[in-house]
Image (tube, helix red, strand yellow):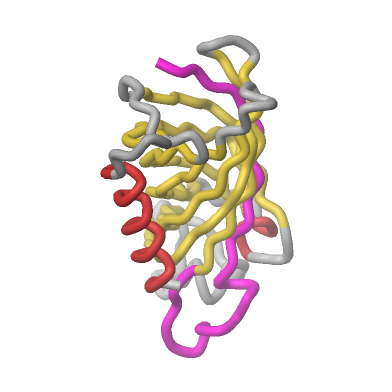
């Protein structure tokens, strides 16, 4: 997957440097969006967290008749809900390269694919100093304001579609998949490794 990510980024820059008759030169564009992140599937984040809000910023650095290439950073926040007396939550941070397809016959519809390397970072108040949020997401404990934090990362990929309501305002639906790179006994456990999210939101083009 890491080789695939490197190849995807390399091809993206090749699109950006292309100077042939198919290249369309546009002013740099920013997309700023807000969305609701919904966790899905049989995994630890779907069982113990609820999405609250997400935001993303994209910069278009290349555009051809077929494909627009954008650098994107998405940040989603999930509230921990497995135990009522535990406070905290998790951020999912997704730096990505996006390939957005240009469809001349339906210019307002913009489907896209994405590839990146994402980070899952959690912070909870718990009484168990040996608490491991990745390998044991539902331990028995009583909170006493001791804070436990952890960060994991892994390859991410996804797809989505945006629809332009106006030249500057759009609606969007997306799906993202993250496979955390875990070590030790928990490596290979799909329940602890996988994060699946669906996002629904709005955005503006600047």
Q: In the current view of this chain or complex, which residue is farthest to the front? A: 21
Image vertical order of residue 104 relative to residue 199, above or below: above
Taking depth in this image into account, of 47 and 82 the one nearest to the observer is: 47
The quadrant of the picture occupied by the C terminus is: top left
Is residue 84 in sight in this rendering? no
Q: Is residue 76 left or right of residue 7?
A: right
Which corner quadrant of the image does residue 41 belong to? bottom right
Q: Residue at x 56, y 34 (%)?
A: 102
The span picked out in magenta is: 180-206
Q: Position of residue 22 (x, y in %)?
A: 42, 36
Q: Is residue 167 magenta?
A: no
Image vertical order of residue 191 relative to residue 90, above or below: below
Image vertical order of residue 116 relative to residue 172, above or below: below
Q: Residue at x 44, y 57 (%)?
A: 120
Q: Residue at x 31, y 24 (%)?
A: 28
Taking depth in this image into account, of 95 and 190 the one nearest to the observer is: 95
Is residue 107 in sight in this rendering? yes
Q: Position of residue 61 (x, y in %)?
A: 32, 35
Q: Position of residue 1 (x, y in %)?
A: 45, 72
Q: In the current view of this chain or complex, which residue is farthest to the right? A: 41
Q: Position of residue 146 (x, y in %)?
A: 38, 57
Q: Is residue 20 left or right of residue 54?
A: left
Q: Is residue 143 left or right of residue 62?
A: right
């Amino acid at each position: 997957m890491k080789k695939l990510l490197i190849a995807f980024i390399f091809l993206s820059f090749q699109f950006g440097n292309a100077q042939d008759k198919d290249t369309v030169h546009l002013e740099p564009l920013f997309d700023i969006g807000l969305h609701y992140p919904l966790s899905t599937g049989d995994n630890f984040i779907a069982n113990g967290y609820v999405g609250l809000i997400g935001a993303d910023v994209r910069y278009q650095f290349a555009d051809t008749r077929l494909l627009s290439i954008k650098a994107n950073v998405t940040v989603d926040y999930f509230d921990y809900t497995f135990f009522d007396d535990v406070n905290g939550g998790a951020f999912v941070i997704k730096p990505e390269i996006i390939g957005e397809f240009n469809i001349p016959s339906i210019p307002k519809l913009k489907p896209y694919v994405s590839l990146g390397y994402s980070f899952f970072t959690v912070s909870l108040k718990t009484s168990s100093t040996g608490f491991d949020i990745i390998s044991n997401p539902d331990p028995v404990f009583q909170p006493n304001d001791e804070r436990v934090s952890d960060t994991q990362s892994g390859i991410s990929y996804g797809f989505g579609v945006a629809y332009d309501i106006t030249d500057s305002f759009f609606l969007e639906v997306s799906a993202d998949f993250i496979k955390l790179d875990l070590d030790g006994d928990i490596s290979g456990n799909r329940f602890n490794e996988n994060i699946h999210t669906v996002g629904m939101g709005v955005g503006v083009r600047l």
